[in-house]
Amino acid sequence: MENPEVEHRIQSLRDRVDEVDRELLRALNERAQIVQELGAYKQEAGIALFDPKREEEILRKVAEENPGPIYDSSMRDIFELILHRIRDLEIQRGEFSE
C-alpha cells in the first residue's frame, strides 16, 4: 500500500532537485556566455585566449571552496569537464585553438 506522506515527501524532494537542475542549466549557460565575451575581448586585445594557469587556478579554488558532500577530487573533475566543454564550444565556433 502506498503511503501518501512518503509519496509527498519524495515528490517534494524531486521538485527541489528539478529546481536545482534548472539553476545549474542557467548558471552553466551564463558562464559560457561570459567566457564567450571574455574570449572576444581577449582576441580584440591580442591576448592569448587559453590560459592554463588560470584554468588550474579555477580548479584549485573549486577544491578549496567545496563545502561537500561531493569529494573535492570529484568536484574538480566536474569543473574540469565544464571548462573543457566550454572551450570545445569556442573551438567549434572557430574562435581559438589549443
Image (spheres, rainbow, N blue to C red):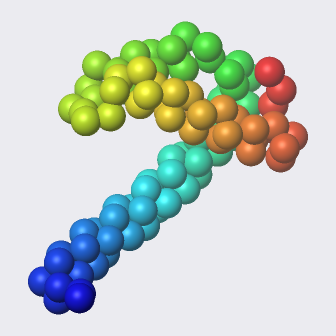
- Residue 26: tell me if it is visible: yes
In the picture as drawn, the residue positioned furthest to the left comes out as: 5
In-image side of 6 versus 34 (left or right): left
Whole-percent x and y of residue 70? 32, 34
Give the number of callouts. 0
Whole-percent x and y of residue 55? 54, 20
Residue sitting at x 17%, y 78%? 6
- Residue 8: tell me if it is visible: no
Residue sitting at x 34%, y 65%? 17
Q: Give residue 40's quadrant in the image.
A: top right
Using the image as rendered, state which of residue 33 and residue 8 is in the foreground: 8
Using the image as rendered, state which of residue 42 and residue 76 is in the foreground: 76
In the picture as drawn, the residue positioned furthest to the top comes out as: 53
In-image side of 23 versus 64 (left or right): right
Whole-percent x and y of residue 95? 81, 38
Residue sitting at x 26%, y 26%? 65
Above or below: residue 87 compared with residue 71: below
Above or below: residue 19 compared with residue 33: below
For the C terminus, the quadrant is top right
For the N terminus, the quadrant is bottom left
In-image side of 78 versus 61 (left or right): right
Above or below: residue 13 compared with residue 96: below
In-image side of 37 versus 7 (left or right): right
Whole-percent x and y of residue 83? 59, 33
Q: Give residue 11's quadrant in the image.
A: bottom left
